[in-house]
Amino acid sequence: MPARAPRVPKSPSPLLDVRFKPLPMTGRVYRRAAATATSDIVDRVRCEFVEMRGFSPTVDQAARLFQINREDCDRILMELVEEGFLTRTPDGRYRLPSQQ
C-alpha cells in the first residue's frame, strides 16, 4: 500500500496568517553631505564623553574608538576644546571639564 500524505487543514492557523510586506529597496546609494556627516561624528563624540564618565582618551585612542582617521579626530577634539565642551590635559588626553 502506498503511504498517504498527511492531511492539510483547509484554513491556515491565525498564527500562520502573516501578510508579507515588501521592503522598499533602491538600487542607488545615497550619500549625505560631508558637513552633515561631520556633524554626526561630532554628536557621536559628544555622546561618548557624556555616557562614559571618566573617559579620557588620547587622540590615537579616540580615533580608533570612533573609527575615523587621526587628523579628523584631532580636529574634532580641538573644536570641542575651543567651544568649552572638553579640556585637554598636559599629557594630551581629552576629558570633560568637570573631571579634573
Image (tube, grey):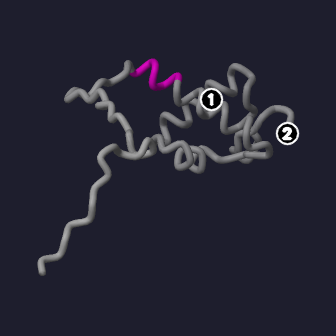
Graded by Cα atoms within 10 Å as few (under 14), some (14 to 19) or many (20 or more), the crowding at tag 1 reads some
Q: Which circle's residue, 2 or 1, is located before the other in the chain?
A: 1
Residue at x 73% of width, y 26% of height: 85
Q: Which residues are magenta?
A: 34-39
Q: Amino acid at mark 1?
A: Met
Q: Say which element carries label 1.
A: helix
Q: In the figure, residue 96 lies in which quadrant?
A: top right
Query: Along the line of sight, which residue is nearer the eye, 16 or 73?
Result: 16
Q: In the figure, residue 75 lies in which quadrant?
A: top right
Query: Along the line of sight, which residue is nearer the eye, 75 or 90?
Result: 75
Residue 64 within the segment the image draws in magenta: no
Q: Is residue 1 above or below residue 30?
A: below
Residue at x 43% of width, y 41% of height: 14
Q: Kindly report the distance in space between the C-alpha atoms of the residues bearing marks 2 and 1.
A: 17 Å
- Tell me the number on the disc at residue 78: 1
Please name the residue that numbered disc 2 is placed on: 99
Residue 51, given in percent of the width and then of the height, sits at 73, 39
Q: Amino acid at mark 2?
A: Gln
Query: Along the line of sight, which residue is nearer the eye, 71 or 45?
Result: 45
Residue 77, given in percent of the width and then of the height, sits at 62, 32
Residue at x 73% of width, y 47% of height: 91
Name the magenta segment's main secondary structure: helix
Residue 58, given in percent of the width and then of the height, sits at 64, 47
Q: Say which element carries label 2.
A: loop
